[in-house]
Image: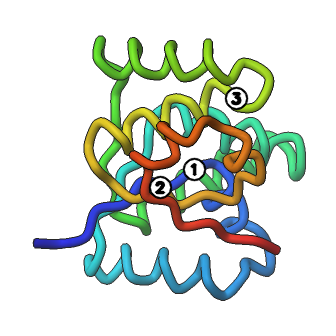
Amino acid sequence: MKKKICIDTGIMTQYISSSPPEPIVNIINRVIKREIECYILKSVLIEVYYQICKWKGIEFARNALTSFQKTVPFVPVELDDGLIQTAGILKCQHRTTLSYIDCMSISYCINNKMEFHTTEKTLKGIQDDTLNKLKVKKYRF
């Protein structure tokens, strides 16, 4: 069975940057080769667009996201009632520590027993019972 991962905004924006870190290039290349199945929440795509737009402008953001979507095979994830409930509970518990996007991605990973690939630095501030359920691969730069 193929390994399944979910990636966050930081992984995508780092990959799209002019000099992406080697560990991120390696994981995305494994996704491109279809060695790993990648899931991305549609709300993460909005956040990526926003972050790149701030950094390089609307046209660059549009082109970069379009290129990523054509090059990197991933499964886009819609919000459903279960994900809304678990993400809402997580946000309530960690309202000052985690963003809405992180709560959605973390909840999706926990609900689907999937590894979360992230650049997020605040994860160690969340409750142990949540961290114990979450498989995390952190990237630091």
User: Do callouts 2 and 1 mark residues in contact (Cβ within 8 Å)?
Assistant: yes
> What label does residue 116 carry, if any?
2
User: Where 124 sits versus 117, above or below?
Assistant: above
Q: Which residue is mark 3?
A: 99
N-terminal of the two: label 2 or label 1? 1
Q: Nearer the viewer, residue 70 or 92?
A: 92
| Quarter of the figure with residue 82 | top left
**Amino acid marked by disc 3:** Ser
Mark 2–mark 1 distance (CA, rounded to whole Å): 8 Å
Q: Would you say 128 lies left or right of 96 here? A: left
Q: Which mark is residue 81?
A: none
State left or right for residue 50 relative to residue 66. Answer: right
What residue is shown with label 1?
8
Q: Residue at x 72, y 66 (%)?
A: 14
13 or 114: nearer the eye? 114
Q: Quadrant of the N terminus?
A: bottom left
The quadrant in which the C terminus is found is: bottom right
Residue lying farthest front? 128
Q: Amino acid at mark 2?
A: Phe
72 on left or right of 16? left
Rounded to the nearest angstrom, the CA distance separating label 3 from label 1 is 11 Å
Estimate the x, y position of residue 13 in percent, counting from the top left. 70, 58
